[in-house]
Amino acid sequence: MADAKNKLESVREWIVEHKLRTVGCLWLSGLAGSIAYNWSQPNMKTSVKIIHARLHAQALTLAALAGAAGIEYYDHKSGAKAERVANFLNTEGHARKD
């Protein structure tokens, strides 16, 4: 159980550090998945398939941005963001002195 929690915490930290990359990957996978699904529908024109894929990907992107905002709010309230900034500034300061 502790290993699963550690893995989940590791994934959460990666998402916090790479929010835009996470949102971009979700957008791309949503677009690709929607295009693949829409292409299996034989009774739609190609332009309608592309428009539907874009709309699905856009909705997924908005949901991902809302999730990223929620994580940012949680980190701000818990003080985790302040710790990350302090650690970043400390390691950057040591790198400049060397």
Image (spheres, grey):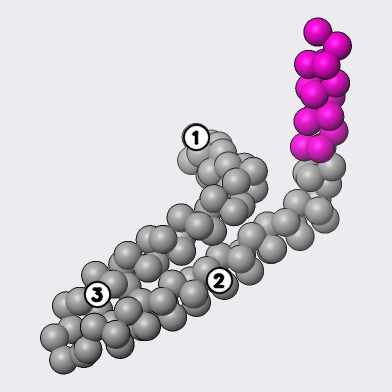
Question: Most extreme residue toward the bottom, as rendered?
Answer: 43
How many marks can you see? 3
Which mark is on residue 86? none
**Residue that carries the numbered disc 1 in the rendered image:** 3
Question: Most extreme residue toward the front, as rendered?
Answer: 47
| Secondary structure beneath label 1 | helix
Q: Can residue 41 be seen in this snapshot?
A: yes
Residue 61 x, y percent position in the rendering: 52, 69
**Residue that carries the numbered disc 3 in the rendered image:** 37
Number of the front mark, 1 or 2? 2
Looking at this view, is 14 or 2 the one in front?
A: 14
Query: Callout 1: few (<14), some (14-19), or many (20+) C-alpha neighbours within 10 Å?
Result: few
The residue at the point 30 percent across, 87 percent down is 48
For the record, the magenta segment spans 84-98
Q: Amino acid at mark 1?
A: Asp
**Position of 41 relative to 14 (above/below):** below
**Residue that carries the numbered disc 2 in the rendered image:** 63
Query: Callout 2: few (<14), some (14-19), or many (20+) C-alpha neighbours within 10 Å?
Result: some
**Position of 27 relative to 37 (above/below):** above
Looking at this view, is 15 or 89 the one in front?
A: 89
Horizontal side, residue 57 vs residue 94: left or right = left
Horizontal side, residue 95 vs residue 12: left or right = right
**Position of 75 relative to 84 (above/below):** below
How far is the residue under mark 3 from the one under mark 1?
36 Å
Residue 53 x, y percent position in the rendering: 36, 77
Q: Can residue 12 be seen in this snapshot?
A: no
Residue 64 x, y percent position in the rendering: 56, 65
